[in-house]
Each structure stands twice: as structure tokens, then as C-alpha cells.
């Protein structure tokens, strides 16, 4: 897969993701997420409101019940989910988007925004930074040029571009979640990783069908 350099997401997109965290499908149910096709170097991460975490920061034993794989999974999946929410919101603001694509975008946004809050809560409960150190790469992140193209596209062209990009984005999330399933320790993080794989593989098939019909 082709590697792309990832620049920090717009503050407005991050704010939107945080605002959405209080609504939609319950966090941890999977629903939608990252994608594959490209990696990116993470230079910064937004600090977000504390969500429902698996560890109580006042309980050292609970906070210790995780490993570095859990931390990396959460730190990487937060910006990955944030970008998916941003892409979905772009599509929902456009005119002449097929109803099936609008419905998919809504489901992605409603599933992933609460998961951003949940994973942020885990990191805070574990006493770990919510920002990822530089030098790590993620699969499926869109670069600035790709995001600009999606923002400018309209109608059927926008729907096709969104589906193509989100398929890649989901594939990347599946890759990261699979790694967590193999290497992680925290029970809630492991469950979320399995949920992401299951839900996003199903959505990849759905998007491929929608794309072929456009």
C-alpha cells in the first residue's frame, strides 16, 4: 500500500468529532472506522474530553492492566476515527448524494465519534498521553490533497470518491485493529478491536457494492 504523509487534522474537524461523541451509537460497538491503503506519520494528536474508560485513574491495579499495544491502538485510532468523522460530515453537507451513501456516512459518524471519547478515556485512565509520539505510522489515512478533493467534489463524483477513500480508510482500521487483537491486553480494547474488524469488514463489502452501482 502506498504511504502518504499525514498532516494534523483541522481543528474544526476535531471539534466536530468531540461534539458528536455525546450522541450516536454506543461506543465500543464497532460500526465504522479507519481504512487502508496508505500510512501516515503522526506529529500531533488532539486532547479530548474524558470518556468512559476501562480503568480508573485512582486505581493503580486497574490502570496497570494494559500494555503498550493497547496504548498504541488507542493513540492511533483516535485520529483515524476523527478523520472518518470529518469525511462523513463532508458528504452529509453536500447535495445530490445518493440516500444509501448518506445513510452510510451517518452510521460511520454516529459509531466512531463515541469511540473517540471512549479511547481518550482509556488513555487518561491508564495515565498515558493522548498524543502519539512522532514516528508512528497508520494505515489508510487520507493526505491533505485527498481531503481537499473530497471537499471540492459534488454529487455522484463526491459519492464515488468518498466510497473509494473510505474503503481504503476502513481497510487501514482493520489492519490496526487486527494487530491489537493479537498483541493487546486490556479487555475493553481487545473487544473494541474485534468489533472494528467485524463491523468495518462488513461496511467495506457494502461500500464496494454501492460503488459498483454508481
Image: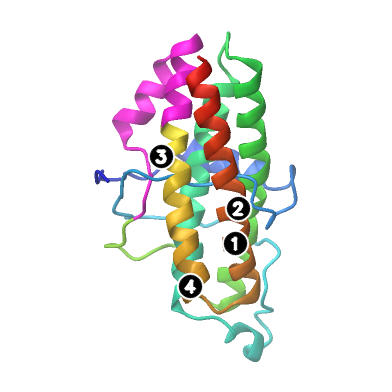
> Start and end of the magenta stretch?
138-164
Q: Residue at x 32, y 34 (%)?
A: 144
Q: Earlier in the sequence, mark 1 or mark 4?
A: 4
Q: Which residue is mark 3?
A: 168
Q: Is residue 106 above or below residue 173?
A: above
Q: Residue at x 55, y 23 (%)?
A: 210
Q: Are marks 2 and 1 in contact (CB under 8 Å)?
A: yes
Crowding at dot 2, Cα within 10 Å, few <14 / some 14-19 / many 20+, comes out as: some
Q: Earlier in the sequence, mark 4 or mark 3?
A: 3
Q: Which residue is mark 4?
A: 182
Disc number placed over residue 2 in the picture, else none: none
Q: Is residue 192 above or below residue 92?
A: below
Q: Residue 24: where, in percent of width, then height?
A: 74, 42
Residue 122 in the magenta stretch? The answer is no
Label 3, secondary structure: give it.
Answer: helix
Label 4, secondary structure: give it.
Answer: helix
Q: Which residue is mark 2?
A: 198
Q: Residue at x 55, y 79 (%)?
A: 185
Q: Which residue is mark 1?
A: 194
Q: Are marks 4 and 2 in contact (CB under 8 Å)?
A: no
Amino acid at each position: 500500500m502506498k504511504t502518504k504523509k499525514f498532516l494534523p487534522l483541522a481543528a474544526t474537524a476535531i471539534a466536530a468529532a468531540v461534539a458528536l461523541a455525546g450522541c450516536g451509537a454506543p461506543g465500543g460497538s464497532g460500526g465504522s472506522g479507519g481504512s487502508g491503503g496508505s500510512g501516515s506519520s503522526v506529529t500531533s494528536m488532539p486532547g479530548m474530553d474524558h470518556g468512559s474508560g476501562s480503568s480508573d485513574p485512582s486505581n493503580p491495579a486497574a490502570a496497570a492492566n494494559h500494555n503498550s499495544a493497547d496504548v498504541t491502538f488507542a493513540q492511533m485510532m483516535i485520529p483515524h476515527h476523527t478523520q472518518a468523522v470529518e469525511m462523513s460530515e463532508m458528504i452529509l453537507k453536500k447535495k445530490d448524494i445518493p440516500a444509501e451513501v448518506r445513510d452510510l456516512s451517518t452510521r460511520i459518524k454516529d459509531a466512531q465519534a463515541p469511540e473517540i471519547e471512549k479511547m481518550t478515556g482509556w488513555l487518561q485512565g491508564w495515565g498515558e498521553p493522548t498524543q502519539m509520539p512522532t514516528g508512528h505510522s497508520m494505515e489508510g489515512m487520507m493526505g491533505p490533497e485527498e481531503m481537499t478533493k473530497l471537499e471540492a467534489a459534488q454529487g455522484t463524483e463526491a459519492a464515488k470518491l468518498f466510497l473509494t477513500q473510505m474503503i481504503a480508510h476502513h481497510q487501514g482500521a482493520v489492519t490496526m485493529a487486527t494487530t491489537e487483537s493479537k498483541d493487546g491486553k486490556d479487555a475493553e480494547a481487545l473487544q473494541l478491536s474485534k468489533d472494528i474488524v467485524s463491523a468495518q469488514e462488513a461496511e467495506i463489502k457494502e461500500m464496494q457494492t454501492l460503488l459498483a452501482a454508481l
